Image (tube, rainbow, N blue to C red):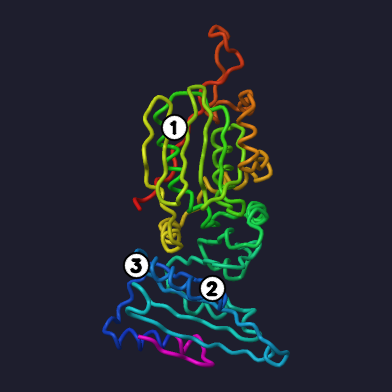
Amino acid sequence: MKIDLTDTTASKINKGLVKARRAIGTPAVGMVLTLVVVTDEENAYDALKAANDASREHPSRTLVVIKRVSRSPRDRTQSRLDAEVRVGTDAGSGETVVLRLYGEVSDHAQSVVLPLLLPDAPVVVWWSVDAPSDPAADPLGALSQRRVTDSYAAEKPVDELRSRAESYEPGDTDLAWARITPWRSMLAAALDQVDSEIVSVEVAGEESNPSVELLAMWLADRLHVHVRRAVSAGPGLTQVRLETTGGPITLHRSDGAMATLALPGQPDRAVALKRRETSELLAEELRRLDPDDTYASALRFGVDRLGGIQSAAERAEAAAQPVPALPVRAVTEPAATGVQPASSESGGADRPTPAKMPPVKKADPQ
């Protein structure tokens, strides 16, 4: 059911929600959170569809905030709020309110959203495009416990990652981080099957895909080894290669669906590593409302500390040349990193023992 409200107020919108629920025979409210989606008119359809699909796993009240651009000085001085109330099959498993803000009211979106929040329920804000440089300081972000951005939608994704690192506050997260959850789980499981020293890592993927940088930063932060970022034709992430003393470990995906995992001394195996839809990524982020310390640690490692970017041609040329093994980065506190110096009696006083992968959040079956 849909109810259109023109030049309305928050009070009338709440009354419209009650009226719509009674009309379809579901007066009880069973939502678990309020999801605020901030987008523009161009991306509103895709964002709303992703939010509705995610609500089937997380029933929620979805508030879609669209700030309309005023074309003339007179329009910019006239404030107006239009709303579209959706319940039932038109709103997934919850209820949806599409808010279009005109004029000066667009600068005070938090005043419109605040009366519409579910009482005693968590609030999550998702910027599908044009996220603020500091989400926690944004007026809408200040209302929420969880703030979701997507650096992939930014014009300069790498610069966006630097901005996220500078302004990070507990509760911030990025859909580019959710995209690599299956990769992190697969790599952690692979490293549990070998007992060799990790020497260096190379992560390859599209040039403008921030998930590649995030995966590289996570590996560098956790393994304390040199990680090189390489460029491939995609789609998305294509390969992770870990050089170890026992041989290379390779996870390669060329078609965005199936990947090949190669371990030393074992036959290659095919593993499912499908690229997921935005709704699946959003649903994953809504499963947890506590701060993601692993994401924070990887983000703060810094994209500028990664190895230089290489193209496919440069990698092929480098592979033809004998390259000495890269040393493990020095660590001041071995106990905190899992890298312990070997004893002099073993003949390797400067050789560290194998770096171990810490446990990570497992991806749900896709």
Q: Give the range drawn in magenta.
A: 1-13
Which is nearer the eye, 105 or 54? 54
| Three-letter residue code for mark 1 | Leu
- Image quarter of residue 130: bottom right
Point out which mark residue 191 bears: 1
Q: Which of marks 2 and 3 is nearer the N terminus?
A: 2
Q: Is mark 1 on a helix, strand or loop?
A: helix
| Three-letter residue code for mark 2 | Asn
Distance CA(mark 1)–CA(mark 2) = 40 Å
**Label 2 sits on residue:** 43
Q: Which of marks 1 and 2 is nearer the N terminus?
A: 2
Left or right: residue 41 compared with residue 29: right
**Label 3 sits on residue:** 56
Distance CA(mark 2)–CA(mark 3) = 21 Å
Q: Is mark 2 on a helix, strand or loop?
A: loop
Question: Is residue 2 covered in magenta?
Answer: yes
Q: Which residue is drawn at 68% across and 87% down?
A: 71
Q: Where is residue 249 in the image (x, y as percent from the top left)?
A: 47, 32
